[in-house]
Image: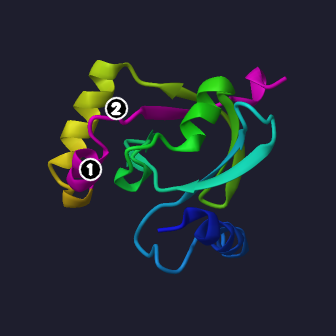
Amino acid sequence: MDWRKLNPRVIAEFRQNAGKVSGFEGLPLILLQTIGARSGNRFDVPLIPVLEAGRIFLFGTNAGSVKQPAWVFNVLAHPRIVVEYDARVFDAMIEPLSRIKADARLALRAQDSEQLQQYLASAAPRVVRVFEVREIAASMKG
């Protein structure tokens, strides 16, 4: 799948329809506004988050590619991001999970997702990074 061609349509539809995008019915979507690790340019990245008890996690599966997704390098270099989710826009920090915690979370989620199992198998031996998105409280902005 050519994400560079698909993403502009997904982003436009996401913003026009308060986070709803055709073809992604029943799935949560999130937009990250990241800063390029090398370029310093802003990139808008649509992703399917993993939601658990009010927490937001992102898995860098890159649809099972052996290449790390570009957004991973961007958030590692610039962890302060803007998030568009559930008709809200907020500042956040994105934090990588330790390898042990990431592997445990991936294994747990893969038990219920054949697609995630396939992505992890086809991405190997690449390490799939896992991140938590933490909203920055209004009192901490600045």
Place of residue 5 in the rendered image (x, y in percent of width and height, measured from the top left): 63, 70
Where does label 2 land, which residue?
127
Earlier residue among tags 1 and 2: 1
* The one of 72 and 122 positioned closer to us in this rendering: 122
Please give left or right for residue 41 compared with residue 16 in the image.
Answer: right
- Residue carrying label 1: 122
Q: Which residue occupies the foreground of this view, 52 or 76? A: 76
Q: Is residue 132 visible?
A: yes
Q: Is residue 93 among the parts visible in the rendering?
A: no
Q: CA distance from mark 1 to mark 2?
A: 11 Å
Q: Secondary structure at mark 1?
A: helix
Task: Identify the residue at image location x=69%, y=27%.
Answer: 78
Disc 2, SS: loop
Q: Amino acid at mark 2?
A: Val
Instruction: Decide: is 68 above or below 18.
Output: above
Report the magenta residues as a range.
116-142
Query: Which of the 4 image quadrants contains residue 63?
Result: bottom left
Q: Are marks 1 and 2 in contact (CB under 8 Å)?
A: no
